[in-house]
Image: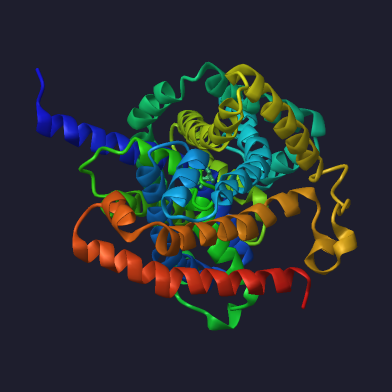
Amino acid sequence: MNHPVLEAWSSNRAFIFAVTGAAVGLGNIWRFPYLTGENGGSVFLLLYLFFMLVIGLPIMIAEIGLGRAGRAGPMQALMRLAQGAGARPQWRYLAVFGGLTLFLILSFYSMVSGWSLAYLVKSVDGSLAQQSPEVIAGAFGQLMSNPGLMLLCHTLFLLLTLGVVAAGVNQGLERLNTYLMPLLYLLLLLLAAYAVTTPGFAEAMRYLFLPDFNAVSWKVVLDAMGQAFFTLAVGACALMAYGAYMPEDQSLPRAAVVVALLDVGVALLAGIAIFALVFSHQLEPTSGPGLMFITLPIAFSELPLSHLLSLGFFLLLLLATWTSSINLAEPLVAMLKDRGWSRLRGTAVIGLGVWILGSLAALSFNVMAEVYPLGFLGGVFAEKNLFGLLTSIPTDIFLPLGGLLIAIFAVYIVPVADIRAAIGGSETFYLLWRRMTAKLAIPLTGLLLLTSVLTFWGV
Ligand code: PFF
Ligand code: NA
């Protein structure tokens, strides 16, 4: 029996779940906490929240709106809209630039997501259960100094991702995700609740929320902006494709607000859980990419049912990163398919490239730790190994640059009536979006982007 209200509700929900699948991943649970720690805590966190609101959210609405207005995949949508507006068809290369960004991000994303596989094994064999924090931290160090194991993890995770993309069953996984992601949120809620009972909780709250303005620097500001783009999956045209399938009557701003709230919520829960553990055990907030992989296993080891909690957490994390990495890979394969390639061939070629780059990035933790591929450029480049480059340039420069162009295209190129119809929702919401994008998001992103290029060269 058809029930229009229920059907509309379920397809509205499907859209929100799909975009949340792309948004929630390593960015929230792994990258957000370690960047917060590297950048001294509260100031980074508050800037990140500010940028989510004034940059991330408006540009996310612009990006999905363009897909909805163009009713096609990113490249075609951009071309169609540009032609309709009498603008240059070259705007379509924005999707190619986005593709390059996605490719670079996927290489480290797959490699790091693979670490969850190693931790799944550790959860099953119980090697971290009831161990001291030193042993648990040591286990992370051992993984990082074992290039063979890291390559195996990266390879397996990439095969998982490519398998789904090659078979074109992304939607099936999305459906699974719909049912299982609430469990991840629940588990993080549980960990945050446990964090409240630990001795480091009060200090963690001060560290995260009490602003210490001595900690402000350009690096903090730029990292916070990059993280806002990365965590929402905005700026690489990956979200554009979703717009094309959005139900007619769904309010885009409202859906985007829901996704952003979920995304921020997951990051905050992870941050609270992790920093309470950091301060309870006198660990270093600045321990970098290992932070989550050290602190959460410590929490599990202290809790009852530690095997089960640890297994459940890493399975759910794997699923969250799986859907995000599929969202990174799919637009690349789709782009090649549009050029007449078969899905299989496109997946194989992209996969090979990502495998090579990700494998080299894994070596940044051991044999290539002190190889600085772009060192000849000077500035910050002189101290960034491959992993450092991959986790900063695509996320902190390419995503904001793509996002800036997307926003400019949506506000100044596409005819107002088209973008108005695509965004839907109330007039107030729409005007608010337009004003925020034109007056805040575009100038602020442009300014910070310029600053970030200058600081990269140490100017
Ligand atoms: N938003 C994802 C995360 O926070 O883990 C990362 C990501 C996925 C970025 C997909 C870009 C993208 F297209
Ligand atoms: Na995210």
Q: Residue at x 74, y 43 (%)?
A: 141
Please give the count of numbered marks on the rendered protein: 0
In the picture, residue 433 is in which quadrant? Answer: bottom left
In the picture, residue 396 is in which quadrant? Answer: bottom right
Q: Residue at x 64, y 24 (%)?
A: 346
Camera-side residue: 410 or 314? 410
In the rendered image, the vertical position of residue 118 relative to residue 106, given as above or below: above
State the image coordinates of residue 244 (x, y, percent, origin top left).
Answer: 37, 38
Check the image and name the residue furthest to the front.
Answer: 86
Camera-side residue: 41 or 433? 433
Quarter that holds the C terminus: bottom right
Q: Can you see residue 283? A: no
Is 103 left or right of 275, judged from the image as shown? right
State the image coordinates of residue 13 (x, y, percent, origin top left).
Answer: 26, 37
Model colouring: rainbow
State the image coordinates of residue 220 (x, y, percent, origin top left).
Answer: 60, 70
Camera-side residue: 208 or 161? 161
Camera-side residue: 282 or 312? 312
Q: Can you see residue 210? A: yes
In the rendered image, the vertical position of residue 393 relative to residue 154, given as above or below: below
Quarter that holds the N terminus: top left
Q: Residue at x 46, y 30 (%)?
A: 312
State the image coordinates of residue 11 (x, y, percent, origin top left).
Answer: 25, 33
In the rendered image, the vertical position of residue 323 relative to residue 65, given as above or below: above
Q: Residue at x 60, y 47 (%)?
A: 93
In the picture, residue 57 is in which quadrant? Answer: bottom left
